[in-house]
Image (cartoon, rainbow, N blue to C red):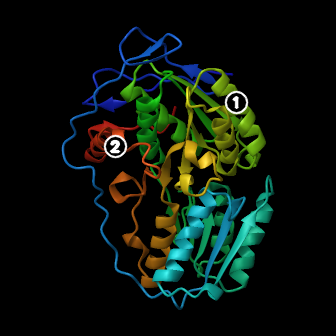
Amino acid sequence: MRTRRGFALAAAVLSSALVVTGCARDTGTPSAGGGATAGGTQCTRNAAPAAAGAAASTAPAAAKSDASGLKVGLAYDIGGRGDQSFNDAAAAGLERAINELNLVKENTRELSAAPNESEDAAATRLRQLVSDGFNPIVAVGFKYATATQTVAAENPQVNFAIVDDNTVDLPNVTPLVFAEEQGSFLVGAAAALKTTACKIGFVGGVETPLIQKFEAGYEAGAKAVAPDIQIDAKYLTPAGDFTGFNDPAKATEVTRGQLDGGADVIYHASGASGKGVFEAVSAASTAQAPKWAIGVDSDQAKTATPPTDERILTSMLKRVDVAVYDYINASAAGDRSTLPKVFDLKVDGVGYATTGDHVADIAPQLDAYKASIISGQVTVPSTP
């Protein structure tokens, strides 16, 4: 257990600094203000900002290109298709390209990583796609950074994209990165508006800078709404151990601990491990004491197994599907310079889901925060 440095949320509309300490800990000290109460804990809530401008994105509609001449390869992160999260979002982008851009399904190939495999295995997977004539190739996940650097340098005639990494500096590599902290801010605000315990939780898969962006945004959004809220943040595995993205049993155990500790809304950024979060929340929820989970990457209320889907408040949408589709479309057009540098709220690269109508009553507040972020009134931190 350790404490990280606090951060300030720079926002002209907020009247005080928001401070959050490290993971595997509770943050916030309950105060005696008004608002929701549970077990004697009171939760004071701020009014939503009066943001200038609308919450709508400014994403331009790109013309559709003919991708019938492409052979597209996808190299998935651990879990591949069926993780109901990150990889499935990438697969949805590929399927959309098949349906809308004339990409021939037989001219696509999908390969998946294994837990804790070597960098050599990732490079071998990319080389296999190259040798079989696939171009472009999309590497789904920052784990492919070293392999993409190596294989792309070996094959300058082949175009690559890598999701969640911008460290590979080669002319034939396009980074597809996201403002995860912005979308996480919105679901953090939702958690703070819905909690009756004034205590919420976060479950990260692996403690890496990328997943810490989810944590930072979530905590900032919750604190923007309820400055005294408590936040119990835990990670399943440390940096370097990627099994945290595919361990539902461990996620169930960690989530039970957070629920037993008083949290009643739990947000996960843990890949396929999120299934365990949903199961724990569903099992603990009762009519008298309802509990909520928040999904990640894709709209997980649409894919979670009943009855766990009924306890998903919302999901932070990280539009990997949009990024993969847009990359294929740009590749077919022969001009990748049109792609955004970051898929953020302005281009609908992140957002929140509304399936189940569980956040319909607080949508005006969430959209006010969204507009404030888009306009620059609120700056969301990317580190806890």
State yes or no: discs 2 and 1 in contact (Cβ < 8 Å): no
Mark 2 burial class by Cα count in 10 Å: few <14, some 14-19, many 20+: some
Which residue, given by chain and number where applicable, does mark 1 sit on?
256
Q: Looking at the rendered structure, which numbered label has been put on residue 195?
A: none
The picture places residue 149, in percent across and down from the top left corner, at 64, 64
Q: What element carries label 1?
A: helix
Is 225 above or below relative to 83? above
Q: Nearer the viewer, residue 115 or 200?
A: 200
Q: Can residue 322 be seen in this view?
A: yes
- The N terminus: image quadrant: top right
Q: Which amino acid does label 1 sit on?
A: Arg
Q: Which of 226 and 242 is in front in this view?
A: 226
The picture places residue 331, in percent across and down from the top left corner, at 48, 79
Q: For residue 257, which quarter of the picture?
A: top right
Residue drawn at the location 70% of the way across and 40% of the way down: 239
The picture places residue 301, in percent across and down from the top left corner, at 55, 52
Q: Which of marks 2 and 1 is nearer the N terminus?
A: 1
Which residue, given by chain and number where applicable, does mark 2 sit on?
363
In the picture, measured across the screen, residue 332 lies left or right of residue 244, that is left
Alpha carbon distance from label 2 to label 1:
29 Å
Q: Is mark 2 on a helix, strand or loop?
A: helix
Q: For residue 251, which quarter of the picture?
A: top right
Q: Which amino acid does label 2 sit on?
A: Ala
- Which residue is the extreme one toward the front? 287
